[in-house]
Every structure is written in structure tokens, then in C-alpha cells.
Image (cartoon, grey):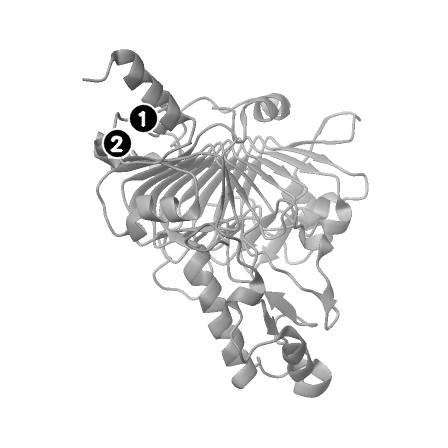
């Protein structure tokens, strides 16, 4: 029989991330306390009804330490097994790799009938026009290419799962897809650069057309009871500002950072850092009245949004509680807006702090996407190291836009685990506690 010293050494070896086995095949890895933590009572919408426990009840056979994409995919079991599980991410995992963990490039995913040069030549507005989206063999080849990449980087997360990052864990190039499942926790991870190799050109999107990509860092679609906490989400070293212009529009290879769509419901997004990203958080993806009605209830609290462009969040339909967030906006060239008031949306914004560049106009913070009203209270702002002052960003919007947005969203949040942080303390609290590695 192995000595206790030898068994302890084996456990240490696993925790260092140097081997990956199911807990049933060897001494079970010690699970960090944060990986078994459940969402506190009343901590936002994800605490409603049954609450959110993720994989807290996982037995030893369903605790996994993963170091590469293949191991991560195996541990997630395709998102189809609802058995409670804890997936501990060790080191850097890259999604654009083959089963032997060798890097894959966009050329490896490309269909033989696709090339970007040919696509640009065929769908140049001077050739194709602007009245219709691309169609025909080249667009079909682009779609096949995109499917090849999607099959590799879309990693489905099942019900009753906790994904937890061990120290310095990073997930690069992946889209965590939480689809039609319940009870998921994602914590303590750095999620970076879910870049699309094959963005689609849409000449009908806006006055000048736009390139649109397919992948978010985290996508909640038809998902319920999800807690995303203490993560850091960004474009990594592949920022959108470095992408080329085609047809005079940015060749945007990133979609959302964390999107909540298609009747997802009961979500809490807390103590995360979102940085250097454009389309940050979309809540509701269609203006069509249907399955989203009465859903898309999301709480967004104590997050840092650092030089992100838009959708912070953009909301349709849902009752969305946005409180105690720190908006750090010093790059006016990349900035569009923050609170997007969409159709049937009900944003309740309380005690948020905005630090901004002097060139960022306060009236630009709110954008009307067809909504009617929102509630705002307790907002503070400052320029650089200048004085802190109270402001109503909604009033600033209404002073320069018609028609006005109403000032009452029609509801008052009750699901808050602790008293609301005084706005003046928000930057210090969020800077100290938000992001991966700060649990």
C-alpha cells in the first residue's frame, strides 16, 4: 500500500496541473473552496427560485483537472450529461488546436472553395451592391468554413456544472456555450480572444454595412440559473482596433464578451472585469415579441468595464439590475455607448461610477434602441483625477435627444445579498475584488 507521503505527493502533482485523470482513477484532487461555493441567497436574479449551485454536489468521479482542449471537452462531456461536475482549469488552454494539442490556423478550417481575397472581390459593394446579403457559392463556402471552426471552438457546458480556474488559468479562443441547460457556475477564469476566422459581410447592417462575427467568449442561450463571477474577459492580444478595414468597415472578428440571449433567464454577473472589447454584453437578441417576454432577468453588479465600446449592457425585454459597477472609459475613439435601452427593456441602474475622458460626452452613455424608460439613481462621475460629482446620465441623454426616455423602469430589485455599496466606494471595491485571481 502506498504511504501517506506518496499519496500526498500524487495529489500535489495533480493540483499542479501536470496530469489529468478522473478523481475515481487516483487520489481525488483537492477542490478549492471557491469551486464548491454556491451563489449566496438573494445574490441577484440567479438566486431566484431554486438558486444556483453549479457542480457543488459533484462526487470525486466528477472532479476533473484539465490542461488542454481535449481534456476540457472530455470533462464537459459535450454538455449532455447533467451529473454534477467540477472542471478545474489549469494553465493556458487554447481552443484552436487539434486533438494532439497542435495549433490550428484559419487556413486549417477554410473550405477548399473559400478564400478571403475571392470573397472580397465577389461581395465588394461596387460589384455586389448594398441591397442584399451575400449569397452563392462563395458565401456557402464561408459558411462551411465557419462551421469547421465552430465545431472546434464551441465548447458546450451542461447542467449542474462549475468551471473554475486554478491560479493563472486562461481559456483562449474558445466560446463557452451554455445552451438550453440549467444551473451553471463559471468562476475565476481569464477568457480571451474568441476570434472568428470567417466574419460575414452584411451590406444591409446600418448605413454603411458591417462585418459580423459568430463567437462570444461566453454565450447563454436558453440557459437558466447561471452565475458568472470573478472572471476577466478580453480580446487578449488580438484587439479589434488592430484589424484591417474592408469595404471601409472594420473587419470585426469578435462578437460578445458575455451574451444572454434566446429566453435565457435568472442570471447573476458579478465581480468580473471586461476590458478592451467592443460588443460587451447583449441581453436579448431580437425585437420580436415571443419567448423572451418575462425572461432575460439578469443582475450585473460590482463589475469593471474598462475601455469597452458598447452594450454594457444592451437590453431587450428583461428586468436587468445594473448596480455598483465601475465604468472606466478613457479611450473615446473606441467608445460608442454603455446602457442600451431596447424594446420592452426595464433597466434599473443604481450607484454606478463613471470615470471618463474629458472628450467622452455624458449624453452618449445612454442609447435608445427602441425602449421607453429606465430607472437611474446614485450615479457619480469624474474626469481623470478631477472632482467627483453626481450626475444623471439619463437626464443628460434626454437633454440632447428626442423623444425623452422615461425615468421609471416599472420595477424595484429585491434580490441583493448585501446592502448596496455607496457609489464613492465603488472604484476601490471593484478594483480590489473584481476579476480572475481575486476570490
Q: Quadrant of residue 292?
A: bottom left
Q: Which mark is residue 29?
A: 1
Q: Which sits in the foreground, 4 or 188?
A: 4
Q: Is residue 286 visible?
A: no
Lateral position of residue 242 relative to residue 56, left or right:
right
Q: Which sits in the foreground, 329 or 194?
A: 194
Q: Residue at x 53, y 58 (%)?
A: 104
> Residue 74: where, in percent of width, then height?
32, 47
**Crowd tier of the residue under label 2, counting other residues whose Cα lies within 10 Å: few below 14, some 14–19, many 20 or above:** some
Query: Dot 2 lies on which element?
Result: helix
Q: Quadrant of residue 392?
A: top right
Distance (Cα) linking label 2 and label 1: 7 Å
Disc 2 marks which residue? 23
Q: Could you tell me which quadrant the N terminus lies in?
A: top left
Mark 1 and mark 2 in contact (Cβ < 8 Å)?
A: yes
> Residue 297: where, in percent of width, then height?
39, 45
Query: Dot 1 lies on which element?
Result: loop
> Residue 2: where, in percent of width, then height?
23, 17
Number of numbered discs: 2
Q: Which sits in the foreground, 287 or 46?
A: 46
Lateral position of residue 130 relative to residue 65, left or right:
right
Amino acid at each position: 500500500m502506498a504511504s501517506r507521503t506518496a499519496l500526498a505527493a500524487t495529489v500535489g502533482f495533480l493540483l499542479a496541473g501536470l496530469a489529468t485523470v478522473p478523481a475515481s482513477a487516483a487520489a481525488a484532487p483537492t477542490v478549492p473552496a471557491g469551486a464548491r461555493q454556491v451563489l449566496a441567497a438573494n445574490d441577484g436574479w440567479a438566486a431566484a427560485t431554486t438558486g444556483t449551485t453549479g457542480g457543488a454536489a459533484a462526487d470525486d468521479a466528477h472532479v476533473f483537472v484539465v490542461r488542454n482542449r481535449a481534456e476540457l471537452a472530455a470533462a464537459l462531456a459535450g454538455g449532455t450529461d447533467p451529473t454534477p461536475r467540477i472542471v478545474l482549469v489549469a494553465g493556458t488552454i487554447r481552443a484552436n488546436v487539434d486533438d494532439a494539442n497542435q495549433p490550428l490556423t484559419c487556413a486549417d478550417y477554410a473550405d477548399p472553395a473559400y478564400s478571403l481575397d475571392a470573397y472580397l472581390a465577389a461581395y465588394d459593394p461596387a460589384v455586389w451592391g448594398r441591397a442584399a446579403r451575400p449569397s452563392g457559392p462563395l458565401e456557402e463556402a464561408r459558411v462551411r468554413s465557419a462551421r469547421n471552426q465552430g465545431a472546434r471552438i464551441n465548447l458546450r457546458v451542461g447542467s449542474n456544472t462549475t468551471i473554475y480556474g486554478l491560479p493563472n488559468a486562461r481559456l483562449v479562443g474558445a466560446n463557452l456555450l451554455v445552451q438550453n441547460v440549467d444551473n451553471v457556475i463559471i468562476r475565476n477564469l481569464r477568457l480571451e480572444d474568441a476570434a472568428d476566422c470567417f466574419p460575414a459581410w452584411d451590406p444591409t447592417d446600418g448605413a454603411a454595412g458591417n462585418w459580423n462575427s459568430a463567437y462570444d467568449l461566453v454565450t447563454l442561450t436558453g440557459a437558466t440559473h447561471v452565475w458568472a463571477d470573478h472572471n476577466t474577459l478580453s480580446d487578449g492580444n488580438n484587439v479589434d482596433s488592430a484589424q484591417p478595414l474592408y469595404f471601409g468597415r472594420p473587419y470585426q472578428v469578435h462578437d460578445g464578451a458575455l451574451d444572454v440571449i434566446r429566453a435565457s433567464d435568472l442570471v447573476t454577473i458579478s465581480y468580473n472585469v471586461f476590458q478592451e472589447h467592443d460588443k460587451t454584453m447583449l441581453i436579448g437578441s431580437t425585437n420580436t415579441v415571443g419567448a423572451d417576454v418575462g425572461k432575460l432577468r439578469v443582475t450585473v453588479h460590482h463589475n469593471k468595464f474598462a475601455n469597452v465600446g458598447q452594450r454594457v449592457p444592451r437590453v431587450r425585454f428583461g428586468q436587468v439590475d445594473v448596480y455598483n459597477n465601475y465604468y472606466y472609459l478613457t479611450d473615446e475613439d473606441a467608445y460608442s455607448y454603455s446602457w442600451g435601452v431596447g424594446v420592452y427593456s426595464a433597466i434599473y441602474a443604481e450607484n454606478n461610477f463613471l470615470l471618463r475622458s474629458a472628450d467622452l460626452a455624458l449624453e452618449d452613455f445612454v442609447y435608445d434602441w427602441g425602449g421607453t424608460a429606465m430607472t437611474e439613481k446614485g450615479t457619480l462621475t469624474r474626469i481623470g483625477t478631477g472632482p467627483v460629482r453626481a450626475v444623471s446620465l439619463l437626464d443628460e441623454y434626454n437633454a440632447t435627444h428626442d423623444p425623452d426616455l422615461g425615468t421609471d423602469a416599472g420595477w424595484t430589485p429585491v434580490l441583493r445579498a448585501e446592502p448596496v455599496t455607496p457609489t464613492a466606494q465603488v472604484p476601490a471595491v471593484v478594483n480590489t475584488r473584481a476579476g480572475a485571481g481575486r476570490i
